Amino acid sequence: MFHVYVLFLILSGIAMLVMAFVRTDYAKRRQVLNFILGAGFTVYGLYLLLVFKGGHYLLFYYVFVLPVLMIYQFFRDRARAKARQASASQAGPGYPAANQAGPGYQPANQAGPAYPPAGASFPPSASPWGTGQEAGNGQTPGYQPDVNRW
């Protein structure tokens, strides 16, 4: 039983270290957790195998369950990331995916803010439409034929 336990410790530690070193752009906290637990399991297993001469040792039952859960979580996160990438690529170039919309993003079917904002007033000199006074020569009110204005 002792050698089976040591074998499980070392194998599960190596499996978690491999998952920690697989380069991913997601689940960074889980990679750190995989590294810490994998290193701990591997070091403790090697200690029991190479240094331990007999006597009392700690038997961690989660050594049998935790690696299975971590492997399951690893592949689940990987599948989610691939699905996110696929949905982002289906949105087309230049258009954000619906689940990756940034702050301030509004879908095209929703009304945006009114321009100019309600209650805003511009001084006559700052108004892009002129002063609002009658031109008197048949032109529309506020029309100024200055081409260098913009």
Image: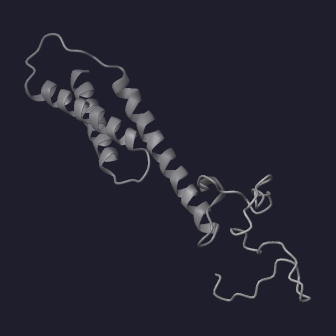
Q: With respect to residue 104, does 139 lie above or below?
A: below
Please give the count of numbered marks on the rendered protein: 0
**Location of residue 40 in the rendering, given as x and y in whole percent from the top left corner:** 23, 30
> Residue at horizontal 32%, vertical 39%?
32
Q: Is residue 96 left or right of residue 144?
A: left
Q: With respect to residue 78, does 48 lie above or below?
A: above
- Quarter of the image with the N terminus is top left
> Residue at horizontal 51%, vertical 53%?
81
Q: With respect to residue 40, does 28 lie above or below?
A: below
> Residue at horizontal 35%, vertical 20%?
61
User: Between 20 and 91, which is closer to the camera in this rendering?
Assistant: 91
Q: Is residue 67 left or right of residue 91?
A: left
**Quick one: which residue is furthest to the front in this view?**
136
**Location of residue 148 in the rendering, given as x and y in whole percent from the top left corner:** 63, 87
User: Between 130 and 18, which is closer to the camera in this rendering?
Assistant: 130
**Quick one: which residue is furthest to the top in this view?**
56
**Location of residue 7 in the rendering, given as x and y in whole percent from the top left corner:** 24, 32
User: Between 150 and 4, which is closer to the camera in this rendering?
Assistant: 150
- Quarter assignment of residue 31: top left
- Quarter assignment of residue 125: bottom right
Q: Is residue 101 left or right of residue 40?
A: right
**Location of residue 98 in the rendering, given as x and y in whole percent from the top left corner:** 66, 57
